[in-house]
Image (cartoon, rainbow, N blue to C red):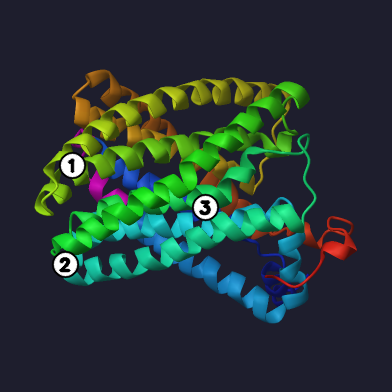
Amino acid sequence: MNDLNRKHEMVRQFTPNWFTATMGTGILALALNQLPIHIIGLHVVAQCLWFLNIALFLLFSILYFARWVAYYEGARRIFGHSVASMFFGAIPMGLATIINGFVVFGIPLWGNSALQAARFLWWADVVMAVACGVLIPFMMFTRQEHSLETMTALWLLPIVAAEVSAASGALLVLHMPDPHVALRIVIISYALWAFSVPLAMSVLVILLMRLVLHKLPPSDMAATGWLAMGPIGTGALGLILLGSDANQIFPAAGLPGIGEVAFGLGVIGGSMLWGYGLWWLLIALLTTRHYLHHGMPFNLGWWGFTFPIGVYAIATLALAKQTHIGFLFVVGGVLVAGLSCLWLTIATRTLHGAWRGHLFISPCLVPGSIPEDRIIEPI
């Protein structure tokens, strides 16, 4: 295959699951910056990862847009595919890590311009997250073939995007000069949290039953076992950050009592979710050991290891900061160290696979992957 045909095939086979690489890269940048210990050059490394993440997100956006322009008939098949369509949720979640980076890294560099960019992108992210959280489940109800036996934690991806936006809103709000704007963002962020977390918890209940009745998914879905930690870690982080914000925002709006309640809810609710996440973390470690023993081929799904570990690590460090419990700082640091090793391994193998071209596979183009009567126009 010559270079021109190779590039065309890369575009034709490009799918949203590549955005999981931006989720993993972005969350590592944010997690490294949250470590409570001073390591020379660590902030610069985290900042460089954030810049890399922006470049990756722009590249993937261009490639996916090009696919819709040049290969519309193939691109639209994704709406009928029961697995590939779940990865639409990775797009707003990947963007959320960039928004958080504008707050953490951009404001010290560019001041108010970075804040305005973060604010604009946050609203765009909210729209995409809400759309994913409603439209993809609707397609599951009406257009796609699903069963309990074939279910995986990928069902979580489209609905978790809203709570990720909520956590981003919690980071953004403290930089809002207008207290009324800040209060509006806090309220919307709480609503986004509720839009996502209860539904994600419902999916986890079904997932547990599926694992009991039908055992583990096949080895190519091994990383999905870690996705359960995503909504739990992000849910805990959202409560903690929003509670910390509320303790400042609500008193400024003349509602000091609500701020105190929200702060307490953040610490208690975050602690409870952290404990729930610990169960899924231990289960994920055991299931990954099982997969490694029986063979676990590399694919883009391995990026599913990174974001859940990252958000759980950041939630752990945020809880440690609120409670001053040293053990939590240690656990958070270990998780960030493990995330760093995983990222290096997965990024290296992804670069190799992308160069060779065998990672560019669109499952919705496989003959017979979608019943012909399900291949219809998008909503």
Q: Position of residue 195 (x, y in %)?
A: 46, 49
Q: Which residue is mark 1?
A: 259
Marks 3 and 1 close (CB-CB < 8 Å): no
Q: Are marks 1 and 2 in contact (CB under 8 Å)?
A: no
Q: Is residue 359 visible?
A: no
Horizontal placement of 147 versus 347: left or right? right
Measured in 3D between alpha carbons, the distance from the residue under mark 1 to the one under mark 2, in whole angstroms, is 28 Å
Answer yes or no: is residue 178 visible: yes
Q: Tell which of 219 and 175 is nearer to you.
A: 175
Please, is residue 9 above or below residue 225 in the view?
Answer: below
Q: Nearer the viewer, residue 233 or 148?
A: 148
Q: CA distance from mark 3 to mark 1?
A: 36 Å
Disc 2 target residue: 111
Q: Position of residue 350 (x, y in %)?
A: 58, 50
Residue 1 percent coordinates (x, y): 78, 70
Which residue in the protein does label 3 denote? 21
Magenta stretch, residue numbers: 36-47
Q: Earlier in the sequence, mark 1 or mark 2?
A: 2
Residue type highlighted by circle 3: Ala
| Residue 62: quarter of image | bottom right
Q: Is residue 376 above or below residue 241?
A: below
Q: Amino acid at mark 1?
A: Gly
Front label number (3 vs 1): 1
Select label 1 or label 2 by which is in front: 1
Residue 125: image tag: none
Residue 43 magenta: yes
Neighbour class for label 3 at 10 Å: few (<14), some, many (≥20)? many
Q: Is residue 106 above or below residue 195?
A: below
In percent of the image, x 36 and y 26: which residue is there? Answer: 334
95, 141: nearer the viewer = 141
Residue type of the residue flagged with mark 2: Gly
Badge 1 marks a residue whose secondary structure is helix
